[in-house]
Amino acid sequence: YFNVPAGYAMLIPHLEKDAALCERFFRNLQMIFYAGAALPPDLWARLEALSIRTLGQRVIMTSSWGSTETAPLATAAHFPIERAGVIGVPVPGVQLKFVPSGAKLEIRVKGPNVTPGYIGNAEQTQKAFDADGFYCIGDAAKLADADDPAKGVVFDGRIAEDFKLTTGTWVHVGGVRVAALAACSPLLQDAVVTGQDRSFIGLLAWPSAAAKDMAPEDLRRQIAEKLSAHNATQGGSSFKVQRVLLLREPPSIDANEITDKGYINQRATLERRHADVMRLYADPPDADVITVTDR
């Protein structure tokens, strides 16, 4: 079964509620594949639990990584992976380069599968490649095991999405998003992270199918409780979520809020929903804004 993380987020609640559907889904399933975005660990754990409950064993899960410009993959896990985030090793003929970028490592790609450039746009082509001819894809990554590269590369978010709070603290958006979704599981389907040039982190979030029958006040209360517990385990402001606004309108493909791979476009969503961001940071906040208190 092949899908993007957004697809799994929509599917899993139905598998959890409908035993017959779950049995049919897993009956002949031999492998689960995801790509296109980071898979939150809670979705991984829920898929595993469903497969074990239905089959008595977990279905092999695997992934790959790349972009349209890498036609389309640059790495692949040709082996079972044990946790979300591992994107495998370079496919034959592909080279990877790791370049320091703040506290992260930017990953760059070179190989016969990589586009030579953008037609009719020499300026964009020049910006896309470094002096050694590596394509600057804009993602961060690290080795799963620094002593054994064969264990694969771990996706570490988008370099271009990260920002600083007014305190000067870097916020790594990919990590915050995945951790917050896991903390709120199974109540949120997806979210964008806010806080650039603000004093604290917030979320604009979409409720999941598992939350559709809940009373709004109960949903807000449970999200606040889950994030409060999450914040208590975090060492600083760079991972603590202090406010959440639940969105009714789903992300729009036409407005470039969500890619064809199901990945939320952080920048486009924040620009389009600027009024919601302003509500999130209003003082005092509106009644429907979830305020997370410290434990």
Image: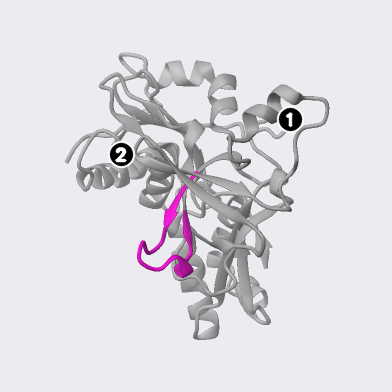
Q: In the image, is residue 108 above or below residue 285?
A: below
What's the magenta region?
140-154
Tag 1: amino acid: Asp
Where does label 1 land, which residue?
Answer: 254
Using a 10 Å C-alpha cutoff, classify the residue at mark 2 as few (fewer than 14 neighbours), some (14 to 19) or many (20 or more).
Answer: many
CB atoms of marks 2 and 1 within 8 Å: no
The Cα–Cα distance between marks 2 and 1, rounded to whole angstroms, is 31 Å
Instruction: Answer few, some or many: residues within 10 Å of disc 1's Cα (few below 14, many 20 plus, some between 14 and 19).
Output: few
Q: Is residue 127 magenta?
A: no
Rendering coords of residue 126 (x, y %):
67, 28
Q: Which mark is residue 239?
A: 2
Q: Is residue 218 above or below residue 168?
A: below
Residue at 67% x, 61% y: name it: 93
Residue type at mark 2 is Phe
Image side of residue 193 versus residue 103, left or right: right
Q: Position of residue 9 (x, y in %)?
A: 56, 54
Position of residue 3 measured from the top left corner of the image (x, y, whole percent): 66, 58
Residue 33: quadrant of the picture: bottom right
The answer to which of 250 and 288 lies nearer the viewer is 250
Q: At 34% from the left edge and 45% from the top edge, which residue is drawn?
A: 222
In the figure, 230 relative to 251: above or below? below
Q: Could you tell me which residue is drawn at 70 percent across and 34 percent down? A: 253
> In the rendered view, does 237 fall on the left or right side of 180?
left
